[in-house]
Image: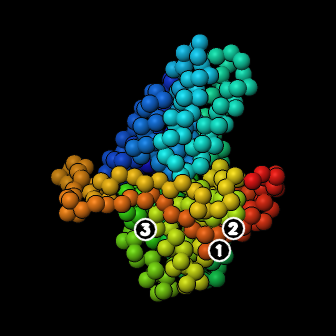
Amino acid sequence: MNVNGRRYRTIWARPGHDKVIQVIDQRQLPHKFVVEDLKSLDDVARAIKEMHVRGAGLIGAAAGFGMYLAALEAPKHRFDDFMLMAAEKLKGTRPTAVNLAVSVERQLKAMAAVSSTGGKISAALETAKEIADEDSDYCMRIGEHGLKMIRDISKKKKGKVVNILTHCNAGWLAFVDYGSATAPIYLAFGKGIKVHVWVDETRPWNQGSRLTAWELGQQGIPHTVIADNTGGHLMQSGLVDLVIVGSDRTTRTGDVANKIGTYLKALAAKDNNVPFYVALPSSSIDWNTRSGSDIPIEQRGEEEVKFAQGLSDGKIRKILLTPSSSRAANYGFDVTPARLVTGLITERGICQASEKGILKLFPERGGNG
Ligand code: MRU
């Protein structure tokens, strides 16, 4: 997508020097646009854990490149042991988004198919690039399927603005390109359909107000940032035509883990007959899990709740919001049960959030789980 008119992905191998992986340091957005070099397994693990990069798709792509950097570092005489250690290290960085483990396993398989160390390193680079390209391609296809839905709503409204509410950042910054929830919006806007996005601020890390608002602004999409508790009121007032969110992990039965607060939006949408869609590439489906209650929910440090970050006197600073002695709890995700989800928008089309619906699009998964 475009940043100040220049095309970027969120992760790439430095041109002419592919031992360095480059990412956008999302901790500094929207105030500073900083490209960061990642040169080692530890750099990638830290970048994922400390959320320089975040969002299920991008975490998956970063893990793919992390395995490649690990392969470059691995001592020849204990290459396989080192790679298993690297795999565990990356998988341990963040527990909820399944894309991370999927990418790591894919890398181990790709490397196992080659015998020489040089061949394994090349396979790891190729696979990392494949994972990134696939993520971008899937998001584009999600966009095409979701576009039809927005176009239908626009026709029903006789061309009036389609108001879409989104939570967290399931945008370009959460993937390699386009985003999942945002891809249909970008395409609709590009086709001249009038759209407006309600952006949940998404406390405590403010992925909505910092990241989604920034990336929509960069593409020129009309949007309004709202405090997290506003969505229900807007839905009651007829000001939301559609909710689209992303997913960090969706079970094979259609339960959806996504950023904390998503469940409350789904409840409000159900009560107000507002369609609630989840846009996700199949790399976010956990084929081995049936119930959302089995999805591990990340708990992060309390300082993310107690402090807020913003720009002051030209510097990015943190300020304390709570009594310093108060305890805070920081649950990163919640689970929206399939019964509250109107449909899943995947790279293969839109389906019901149910095992039957999902398997219609992915029949080859019928045997698993
Ligand atoms: O904690 P984050 O910022 O990694 O959480 C991201 C989300 O919850 C997104 O909505 C999710 O990853 C779906 S889009 C990739």
Q: Which of the 4 image quadrants contains residue 200? A: bottom left
Amino acid identity at mark 2: Ala
- Dots 2, 1 in contact, CB < 8 A: yes
- In the figure, 331 relative to 266: above or below? above
Residue at position x 44%, y 30% in the image: 42
Q: Earlier in the sequence, mark 1 or mark 3?
A: 3
Q: Which residue is mark 1?
A: 339
Does the image show residue 222?
A: no
Name the secondary structure under disc 1.
helix
> What distance separates the C-alpha of mark 2 from that of mark 3?
23 Å
Dot 1 surroundings within 10 Å: few (below 14), some, or many (20 or more)? some
Nearer to us in this view, 274 or 144: 274
The answer to whether the beta carbon of the residue marked 1 is less than 8 Å from any atom of ligand 1 is no
Q: Which residue is mark 2?
A: 353
Going by the image, does 66 lie left or right of 131?
left
Q: Which mark is residue 150?
A: none
The answer to whether the beta carbon of the residue marked 2 is less than 8 Å from any atom of ligand 1 is no
Q: Which residue is mark 3?
A: 200
Amino acid identity at mark 3: Asp
- Nearest-to-viewer mark from 1 and 3: 1
Going by the image, does 309 lie left or right of 222?
left
Amino acid identity at mark 1: Arg
